[in-house]
Image (spheres, rainbow, N blue to C red):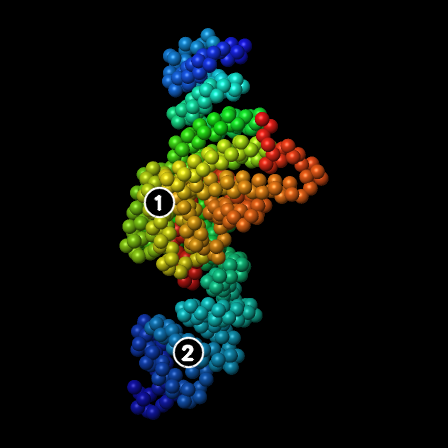
């Protein structure tokens, strides 16, 4: 029944996300025990349920609920309840879905909250792994011609660069440069292709570099 | 005295020769030198080649004992010339061995090699397997010193066959040890281990403590490099005990440093830190920068594992700072140390978000980064950035991708490359 059609009111949806997050942060058997009747017993059960809520939040298209979910996800990661790789995987997944739907609002929301999360990270390897996700999302945005997405991504990269510079995070900035170089290279390769023979290569102008967003 | 009174020149020369030989035998080389030189002069005046050549040969030995290698060489060259004229091939062989040893002392390994090759050829013709084994063994040492590894191995292998046939266990043990060191130096640790094991067993049987300790230490190092840390630790503890008993400070320092690496690798951090600090002190006391650098590198890893990251970085920096002043040593050892330090330091700097560009200039051997994956990855990314700035998209793309893959493929970036210490460098044990 998709959690009673993911609760009918926005307040209900947000409250449910908060509640599950609260249980995961608490993690005590006593608190988890209250949900046995609903079929939730272990931390893994709650985690799976929480991630399902995320999927529903993005399906709902409600920016506040999506924002609430992402905020909770990053909070759980900050409290070591969710693994960093899991966070990166989810952001990638939701980001790709937004790109697929040319949903610039969702994409911007994801990028902005993800940037907050990245700025809070201290471990170099984790930051670099996050930058890898941004690059992947950027490449996809370029390849499908999601111009608004590319613009949003550039804003985030500029913001991150400012953060890395002010904090003296050299390796992170170096990796950020990789992200930018990859994006430029990818776009540059697209231009080369576009400039050659679009038809022969089956180039789709609707999806090509610089084409208008479908929205 | 009687011969002097009688004016018997030949008798006088003979007496002086005999007296010189006796004094030589007694270790009174100055006295021997004076008598033999006089005898040499007299026999030369009488044009007695047979006696002159004998005295020349003896004088070569006496000057060698006195540390006057130049004069020793001069007399031996003279003796060689006369023996050749006389067709005395046995003596030619003996003199060639002597001359080879003089060349060796002067560091003229090419010259030593030439003498030994001729001695070996003659010896093969004359028969006499002891002499042949000796020539082969010495040629192995000389080839090793000349950096001709393959030739050295081949000579030692030939020598080993003859030495085994002769049942000369001392020689067999030494040859096995040298073969172990050669394979060790070229990175064939498995084969090196086989040789070290046999040499260790022989030195145990022979009751020779000092070479036994070296074999224990080197076998421990080889096992450590192959990741068999527990067995390595056991051998190194035994080596350490023997070195302590022998009061061999160099050995003690080496064994402690290696034991620290083994314990560190096993996660026994406190034990590792203890022995490494002791090794560092001993090596500092001896002014041995190479071993100080190795100790610092290993202490860096242990400190990092203990969570003292700043201190670890300082150790690596300090260790790297010593590399330029290292005494000459085997290229493989120097390379292992520098590569370990650079790899560890790059990982630490990378993890703490620092720059690593300055480390490229410290890479040994003409700048090949192959052994330092993280630095190679970084360089590839850097080159990619450079290509992108010139609009060469394809190359930039490939370089950046490659670099990232290389760095990410390394997994968790923690310093973990220990350096190991051999006790004595190949060729140092004389022979």
Residue under pointer 2: B74
Q: Chain of mark 2?
A: B
Looking at the image, which residue is at 35% across and 55% down?
B322
- Residue A129 is situated, as x and y percent measured from the top left of the image, at 47, 35
Residue under pointer 1: B313
Can residue B422 be spotted in the picture? yes
In the rendered view, tell whether residue B429 sits above or below residue B341: below
Task: Tell me if mark 1 has few (under 14), some (14-19) or many (20+) residues whose alpha carbon lies within 10 angstroms of its own.
Answer: many
Q: Is residue A92 left or right of residue A117?
A: right
In the image, B374 versus B155, the foreground residue is B374
Query: In this view, which residue lies farthest toward the bottom?
Result: B7
Check whether the beta carbons of the residues at disc 1 and disc 2 lie within 8 A of each other: no
User: Total of numbered circles in the picture?
Assistant: 2
Element at label 2:
helix
Query: Which comes before the other along the chain, label 1 or label 2?
Result: 2
Query: In this view, which residue lies farthest toward the right?
Result: A200
Q: Which of the 4 image quadrants contains residue B248?
A: bottom left
In the image, A119 versus B181, the foreground residue is A119
Q: Chain of mark 1?
A: B
In the rendered view, tell whether residue A157 sits above or below residue B9: above
Find the distance from the CA under tag 1 to the CA under tag 2: 55 Å
- Residue B336 is situated, as x and y percent measured from the top left of the image, at 44, 51
Task: Tell me if mark 2 has few (under 14), some (14-19) or many (20+) residues whose alpha carbon lies within 10 angstroms of its own.
Answer: some
Can residue B219 be spotted in the picture? no
Badge 1 and badge 2 in a common chain: yes
């Amino acid at each position: 029944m998709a959690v009673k059609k993911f609760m009918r009111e926005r307040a209900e949806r947000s409250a449910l996300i908060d509640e599950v997050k609260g249980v995961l942060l608490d993690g005590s058997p006593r608190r988890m025990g209250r949900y046995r009747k609903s079929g939730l017993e272990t931390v893994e059960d709650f985690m799976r349920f929480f991630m399902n809520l995320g999927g529903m939040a993005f399906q709902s298209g409600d920016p506040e609920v999506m924002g609430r979910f992402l905020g909770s996800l990053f909070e759980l990661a900050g409290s070591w309840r969710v693994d960093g790789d899991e966070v990166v995987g989810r952001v990638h997944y939701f980001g790709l879905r937004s790109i697929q739907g040319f949903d610039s609002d969702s994409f911007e929301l994801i990028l902005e909250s993800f940037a907050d999360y990245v700025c809070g990270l201290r471990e170099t390897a984790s930051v670099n792994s996050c930058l890898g996700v941004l690059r992947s999302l950027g490449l996809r945005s370029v390849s499908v011609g999601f111009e608004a997405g590319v613009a949003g991504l550039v804003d985030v990269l500029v913001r991150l660069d400012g953060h890395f510079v002010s904090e003296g995070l050299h390796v992170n900035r170096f990796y950020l440069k990789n992200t930018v170089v990859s994006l430029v290279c990818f776009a540059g390769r697209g231009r080369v292709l576009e400039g050659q023979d679009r038809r022969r290569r089956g180039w789709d102008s609707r999806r090509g570099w610089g084409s208008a967003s479908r929205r | 005295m009687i011969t002097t009174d009688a004016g018997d020149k030949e008798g006088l020369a003979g007496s002086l020769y005999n007296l010189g030989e006796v004094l030589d035998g007694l270790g009174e080389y100055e006295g021997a030198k004076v008598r033999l030189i006089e005898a040499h002069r007299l026999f030369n005046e009488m044009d007695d080649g047979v006696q002159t050549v004998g005295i020349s040969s003896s004088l070569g030995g006496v000057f060698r004992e006195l540390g006057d290698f130049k004069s020793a060489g001069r007399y031996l060259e003279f003796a060689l010339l006369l023996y050749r004229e006389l067709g005395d091939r046995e003596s030619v062989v003996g003199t060639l061995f002597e001359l080879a040893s003089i060349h060796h002392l002067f560091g003229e390994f090419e010259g030593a090699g030439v003498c030994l090759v001729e001695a070996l050829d003659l010896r093969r013709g004359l028969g006499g397997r002891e002499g042949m084994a000796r020539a082969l063994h010495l040629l192995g040492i000389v080839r090793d010193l000349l950096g001709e590894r393959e030739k050295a191995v081949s000579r030692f292998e030939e020598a080993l066959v003859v030495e085994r046939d002769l049942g000369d266990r001392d020689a067999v043990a030494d040859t096995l040890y040298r073969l172990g060191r050669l394979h060790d130096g070229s990175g064939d640790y498995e084969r090196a281990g086989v040789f070290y094991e046999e040499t260790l067993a022989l030195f145990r049987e022979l009751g020779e403590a000092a070479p036994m300790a070296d074999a224990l230490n080197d076998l421990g190092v080889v096992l450590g490099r192959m990741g068999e840390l527990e067995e390595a630790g056991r051998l190194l503890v035994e080596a350490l005990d023997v070195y302590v008993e022998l009061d061999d400070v160099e050995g003690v320092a080496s064994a402690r440093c290696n034991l620290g690496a083994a314990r560190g690798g096993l996660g026994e951090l406190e034990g590792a830190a203890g022995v490494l600090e002791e090794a560092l002190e001993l090596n500092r006391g001896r002014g041995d920068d190479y071993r100080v650098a190795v100790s610092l590198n290993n202490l860096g890893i242990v400190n990092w594992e203990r969570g003292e990251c700043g201190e670890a970085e300082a150790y690596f920096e300090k260790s790297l700072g010593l590399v330029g002043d290292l005494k000459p040593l085997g290229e493989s050892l120097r390379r292992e140390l520098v590569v370990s330090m650079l790899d560890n330091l790059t990982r630490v700097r990378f993890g703490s978000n620092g720059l690593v560009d300055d480390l490229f200039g410290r890479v040994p051997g003409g700048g090949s980064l192959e052994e330092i994956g993280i630095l190679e990855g970084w360089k590839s990314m850097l080159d990619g950035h450079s290509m992108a700035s010139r609009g060469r998209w394809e190359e930039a793309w490939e370089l950046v991708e490659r670099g990232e893959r290389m760095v990410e493929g390394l997994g968790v970036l923690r310093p973990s490359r220990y350096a190991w210490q051999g006790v004595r460098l190949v060729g140092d044990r004389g022979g």
